[in-house]
Amino acid sequence: MDKVDRIIAAARGAGLDGPVEITPPAGAGTAWTVAQTDRRWPVRLDQMAVDPADARVVNEVRGESWPLLAQLTRIGIAAHMGELFGVANQILLASLAVDLVLITAAVGWALPVLGVTLLAFLALDATAGLVRGRRRQRTDGTPAQPA
């Protein structure tokens, strides 16, 4: 059995289940890190440090021991990134993005001063992006990449 398999077996034996991410030691004499990466509900946040010499768990951090705000922050980030509930979360986020565009257009139509100001800002921003891209193309000779 190679070293990575021994590290995984030690973490699994200590109760780490589901998908995991293994990080090799930063230097000699330090431990491998094994962390759960399952972001479905319930979120698994457990991590363990495993000594590479004898494949013994030398430290563990259980998700339940995190402060409540840290747990909520982790869950919020996973939801925001579309990782929490899989495809359902991604569909919800995409529909929110489309709805925000439609809502912005409706508000701009209902409040014309806001709508005209928003269109002017978008036109100015697009123009500035084009000018910046052309300047970059002229200075280094490479084709400009969209910003």
Image: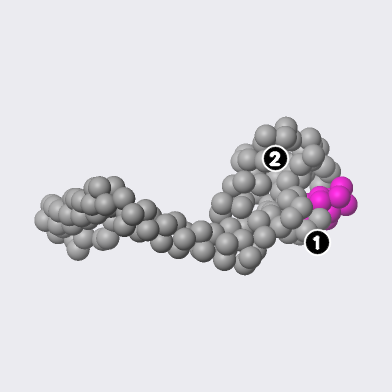
Closer to viewer: mark 2 or mark 1: 2
Residue hosting label 2: 71
Mark 2 Cα shell of 10 Å, populated few (<14), some (14-19), many (≥20): some
Where's the C terminus, which quadrant?
A: bottom left
Main SS, magenta region, reads helix
Spot occupied by residue 113 in the image (x, y as percentages of width and height) = 25, 47
- Name the residue at 20% across, 55% down: 123
Instruction: Give the magenta-colored segment's residue range.
Output: 6-16
> What label sits on residue 65 in the rendered view?
none
Spot occupied by residue 63 in the image (x, y as percentages of width and height) = 76, 41
Identify the amino acid type marked 1: Met
Q: How is the image coloured?
A: one colour
Spot occupied by residue 86 in the image (x, y as percentages of width and height) = 65, 63
| Distance from the alpha carbon under mark 2 to that under mark 1 | 36 Å
Where's the N terminus, which quadrant?
A: bottom right
Give the vertical position of 46 relative to 123 (above or below): above
- Name the residue at 84% across, 43% down: 56
Mark 1 Cα shell of 10 Å, populated few (<14), some (14-19), many (≥20): few
Judging from the image, what secondary structure is the residue with disc 2 in?
A: helix
